[in-house]
Amino acid sequence: MQVHQWKKQVLDELPSIFSSRRAQNQKEQENLTASLYQQIGQLKVELDWLKKNLALSLDHKRQFVEPNHPDISVARQCELLDLARSSWYYKPVAVDPVMHP
């Protein structure tokens, strides 16, 4: 008889046990998502500010590119610096004064 009462009590309370855990996990996930979106927004604001205020010459921008960077490709670095990727690869050639008077 006692076992029957315990079983009934467990079966009655079982849904609320799992729903409270699920609600807690969902709340933690929502907090994490909100925090990550806040960080993304902050980084976007900082990047936009940097691009606006970092008025460098083409040569200076080219010097910032790190071709062997482990995490950021050359293409992405050029994009962040507002530098055409082709201008990073461009190597100026000296003009021969004899050929071009």
Image (spheres, rainbow, N blue to C red):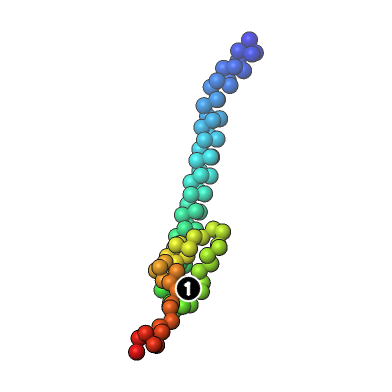
Q: Is residue 63 left or right of residue 83?
A: right
- The amino acid type found where label 1 is placed reads Arg
Give x and y (percent) for residue 78. Answer: 44, 66
The residue labelled by disc 1 is 62
Q: Is residue 78 left or right of residue 70?
A: left
Closer to us: 96 or 3:
96
Specify the farthest residue to the right: 2
Give x and y (percent) for residue 16. Answer: 52, 29
Give x and y (percent) for residue 13. Answer: 55, 25
Q: Say how many tags the image has.
A: 1
Residue located 50% across and 54% down the image: 35
Q: Is residue 1 above or below residue 82?
A: above
Specify the farthest residue to the left: 101
Question: Which quarter of the figure has residue 95?
Answer: bottom left
Residue located 40% across and 68% down the image: 86
Please say whether residue 54 is visible from this viewpoint.
Answer: no
Please say whether residue 10 is visible from this viewpoint.
Answer: yes
Residue located 52% across and 35% down the image: 22
Q: Is residue 66 left or right of residue 47?
A: right
Specify the farthest residue to the bottom: 101
Q: Is residue 25 above or below residue 92?
A: above
Closer to us: 58 or 37:
58
Which quadrant is the C terminus positioned in? Answer: bottom left
Q: Is residue 53 above or below residue 67?
A: below
Which quadrant is the N terminus positioned in? Answer: top right
Residue located 51% across and 32% down the image: 19
Give x and y (percent) for residue 3. Answer: 64, 13
Closer to us: 10 or 84:
84
Specify the farthest residue to the top: 1
Badge 1 element: helix
